């Protein structure tokens, strides 16, 4: 039987379903007939979801294939080895849930402090770094005033297209170009469009 290697690239793939796993997936689909033993460094690297782990175990058992954990000396083709998989998978899933809970808790704490937790600056706001770490959104006075001007014009008889033409004639940089200039970068001289006015 030919041998194959599917690299272990950290925490991400373990949460994916069997056939969609990068590298490993093909060995369970079009290359399924090319091997007899699935050897892993540790069983919790095979999957951190009990459901996915059970799927892999059942798939291998139905096809007469063995699963072996090299570092844990577990051979699931033996009676003793069959006792360990679900226990290990349950602990691995609990560990993954704990990591996610901590990440969520950290995000909620940053939000409570007014710290920006991700994404690009929305129109009229820029980032300001905080002493305790992270970034906070602060209103840009120039573009906050421009935003109010655009809103008032839209509430009047100005169309988005007419506003865009006017801003381009006045040489007003778009919001993204304004941010580039503020950072000391070269502006791209992108023109205002009706879609940009509506999105802003």
Image (cartoon, rainbow, N blue to C red):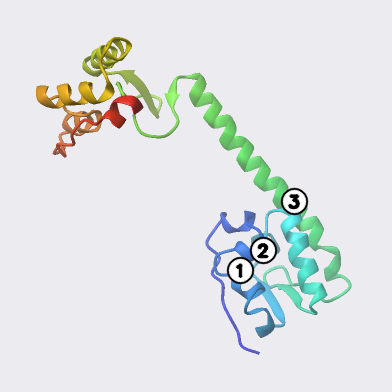
Pointer 1 local density, CA inside 10 Å: few below 14, some 14–19, many at least 20: some
> Can see residue 195?
yes
- Asked which secondary structure carries label 3, the reply is helix
Mark 2 or 1 closer to N-term? 2
- Report the label total: 3
Residue at 24% of width from left, 32% of height from top?
A: 176
State the residue position of label 2: 18
Q: Is residue 25 left or right of residue 89?
A: left
Is residue 28 left or right of 156 when viewed as pictured?
Answer: right
Residue at the far right in the pictured view = 79
Q: Are the two marked residues, 2 and 1, in contact with CB atoms closer than 8 angstroms?
A: yes
**Vertical placement of residue 6 versus 45, above or below:** below
User: Who's the residue at 71% across and 79% down the image?
Assistant: 37
Q: Which label sits in the foreground, 2 or 3?
A: 2
Q: Reply above or below: 155 against 21.
A: above
Q: Residue at x 31, y 14 (%)?
A: 151
């Amino acid at each position: 039987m030919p041998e194959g290697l599917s690299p272990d690239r950290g925490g991400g793939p373990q949460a994916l379903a069997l056939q969609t796993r990068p590298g490993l997936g093909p060995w369970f689909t079009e290359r399924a007939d090319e091997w007899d033993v699935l050897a892993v460094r540790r069983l919790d690297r095979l999957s951190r979801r009990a459901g996915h782990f059970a799927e892999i175990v059942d798939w291998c058992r139905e096809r007469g294939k063995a699963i072996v954990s090299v570092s844990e000396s577990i051979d699931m083709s033996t009676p003793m080895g069959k006792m360990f998989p679900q226990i290990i998978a349950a602990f691995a899933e609990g560990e993954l849930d704990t990591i996610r809970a901590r990440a969520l808790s950290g995000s909620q704490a940053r939000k409570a402090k007014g710290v920006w937790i991700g994404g690009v600056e929305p129109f009229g706001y820029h980032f300001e770094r905080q002493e305790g770490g992270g970034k906070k959104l602060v209103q840009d006075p120039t573009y906050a005033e421009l935003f109010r001007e655009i809103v008032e014009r839209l509430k009047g008889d100005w169309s988005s297209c007419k506003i865009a033409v006017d801003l381009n004639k006045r040489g007003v940089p778009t919001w993204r170009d304004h941010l580039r200039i503020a950072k000391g970068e070269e502006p791209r001289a992108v023109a205002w469009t009706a879609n940009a006015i509506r999105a802003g």
